[in-house]
Amino acid sequence: IRRLPGMRDEPSEELGRRTSLQKNLREHLSSHAYQVIDTPLLEPTELFLRKSGGELATRMYTFTDPGGNRVSLRPEFTSSVIRYYLERANGEPLPLRIQYSGPVFRHDESSGFKQFHQTGAEIIGAATPESDGEVLALAQDGLSLAGSPSYTCVVGHVGVLLLMLEEIGLSHRAQVFLIASLPRLKQSPGESQKVLERAHSLGLMKSGGNARRANQLVDDMKEEEALGLLQDLFHNSLSGIQGSRSMEEILTRFMQKLKRGDDPKKIEQGISLFLRLASIKGEEEKALPQIRSTLQDYGISPRALMPLEDVLASFHQRCPSTALTVDIGLVRGITYYTGMVFEILAPGPNGPITLCGGGRYDGLVKALGGEDDVPALGFAYTLESILELSPENSPDDLEERHLAPSNP
């Protein structure tokens, strides 16, 4: 019987290198007051689906346990850390700094289900740009422990994208759709027409003809006035098809559908803006002026860029000589991230390898059952990716590396 594809045995030498790297990263995080916790390997499937908005559904190792519960091997740690906070640590002084290490499982298109190891950190209850700067500096400093020869930290900001689309006048539903479409637009400008067609098929745009006149009829009315008018108009036609729903329920949903459609021209403007932004990537001194110029062309206030600028300024207070790459089109899961996002990449034999990634997710605590939104952010290293780029490092080499703590 052979091992499952994507699952790995670790010979003694490989195991020694990984555990040494893990130990050094943990000590690095502990030196900045991140307390160590562990969470179960197996969690309710719903925990991860709520976090990802279903994005991870096809990539998780999911099954029904003997008790009839739908469970999954963890595909990442953040959801479990937030569950831990809600169950055990809620009420502790904030901000709360937590670190973790262990195996995770995700489906890989080429190898089937894949096991790999993460070490990461989360800050719960920190809302300021200084916290974002801390996380960026902490993530980069940790890579010094692995002796990574060269890497690039790429930074974006989902919150800035939302502010831009809000200034255009798009609904939150349309904003989320366009940001989720950004990877397609970055891949090829020819995808813009497909994105527009998708927006239409999802009902994001107001329709023409009679539907447009109905939109105009209810758009400027108070909800109770619009509902009363629709009841008068449709009373006879709906009386035989109500089923288990009341007329008020049917008409309320109809009215909400009419009101939520966006102006097609504004959606086209949002797509056009994102096509311009998707092509801007480079060192911040060059990228930021290009982004400001683009915003000016679209009549968007440069204030929309301030959240990203504040994060970059906070990082440079800690690491004044370290260059960052700005990619405003970087999106790491719109259903999850709400602010700064980043990836740390290194050149590999077959293209860039992601060593680390993370960002801010201020809505996750409430999404997983908290009474209120609690600001939070974090990141995770992929240990196998780091070791792939430093095969010469022996366990002894890693033990001898020392990192001077930077200001948290």
Image (cartoon, rainbow, N blue to C red):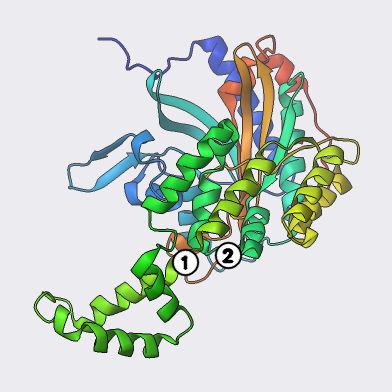
Instruction: Give whichever of 231, 123 is nearer the camera.
Output: 231
Q: Residue at x 40, y 63 (%)?
A: 208
* Amino acid beneath label 2: Val
- Residue at the image point whose x is 32% and y is 14% from the top: 3
Question: Relative to residue 235, is residue 399 depicted above or below?
Answer: above
The image shows residue 213 at horizontal and vertical percentages of: 40, 73
Report helix, strand or loop for mark 1: loop
Specify the amino acid type for callout 1: Gly
Circle 1 crowding by C-alpha within 10 Å: few under 14, some 14–19, many from 20: some
Q: Residue at x 41, y 50 (%)?
A: 53
Q: Is residue 385 visible?
A: yes
Look at mark 1 in the image and give the residue it sits on.
370
Residue underneath mark 2: 374
The residue positioned 64% from the left and 21% from the top of the image is 352
The residues tagged by marks 1 and 2 sit, at their Cα atoms, a distance apart of: 8 Å
Q: Quadrant of residue 20?
A: top right
Whether residues under marks 1 and 2 lie with C-beta atoms below 8 angstroms apart, the answer is yes
- Front-most of 263 and 136? 263
